Amino acid sequence: MPGIGPRTAQRLALHLLRQPEEQIRAFADALLAARSQVGQCQRCFHLSAEPLCEICRNEERRNGQICVVADSRDLLAMERSREFRGGYHVLGGLISPMDGIGPELLQIQPLVARVDREATAEVILALTPSVEGDTTSLYLARLLRPFTLVSRIAYGLPVGGELDYADEVTLARAFEGRRPVE
């Protein structure tokens, strides 16, 4: 599983093997139920057991802003910051010609239609600072500029990070994203 190293996987497997059979069956049933009950929100494509996810159902979050992320993990990371109070749109990945992922495989057309339909004031691109993320951001900006303001979150140094450990691209982006001291 992603994010689980060999040692953690071994510990989890050994723990599960020590559990009573009833608990293992209940765990397996819970996994199967989650897999069958959880789908995608019809509006933003985030994970949801309902036709619309909790965020899209929240009327207070319809403020004319849509934050575009690659996947639901990114959406959850943005939510942990408690800074963004608008809606989201989950693309389902990033454009990556090397991996055979073109714009047609992502939820880009529904985003364009949604921006037009909902009279969105701003689309905020929150995509990974990588070749694929930059490619996807440029593609989306070109598509969406006729409809709305398109911005991108700033990238730079993490809080508590040391300058001498930062790579050149991170430092360059930190300079690009600078703002006046208040």
Image (tube, grey):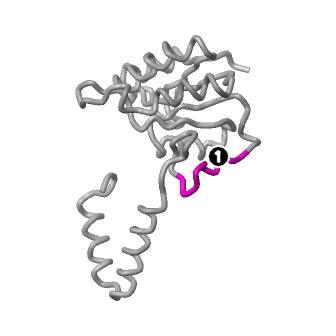
Q: Was residue 137 drawn as part of the magenta stretch in this picture?
A: no
Pick the front one: 143 or 1: 143
The residue positioned 35% from the left and 27% from the top of the image is: 95
Residue 59 percent coordinates (x, y)? 75, 43
The residue positioned 23% from the left and 26% from the top of the image is: 98
Residue 118 percent coordinates (x, y)? 67, 28
Residue 55 percent coordinates (x, y)? 64, 46
Residue 68 percent coordinates (x, y)? 53, 31
Residue 11 falls in which quadrant of the image? Answer: bottom left
Residue 114 falls in which quadrant of the image? Answer: top right
- Decide: few, some or many residues near mark 1? Use Cα within 10 Å; few <14, some 14-19, many ≥20: some
Above or below 83: residue 21: below
Q: Quadrant of the C terminus?
A: top right
Which residue bears the numbered disc 1?
Answer: 55
Pick the front one: 126 or 168: 126
Above or below 8: residue 120: above
Above or below 129: residue 18: below
Amino acid beneath label 1:
Ile
Q: Was residue 50 drawn as part of the magenta stretch in this picture?
A: yes
Judge from the rendering whether residue 113 lies leftward or rightward of residue 103; answer left or right: right
Q: Which residues are magenta?
A: 48-58
Pick the front one: 16 or 114: 114
Residue 82 falls in which quadrant of the image? Answer: top right
Q: SS at mark 1?
A: helix
The residue positioned 58% from the left and 40% from the top of the image is: 43
Q: Quadrant of the N terminus?
A: bottom left
The residue positioned 54% from the left and 24% from the top of the image is: 112
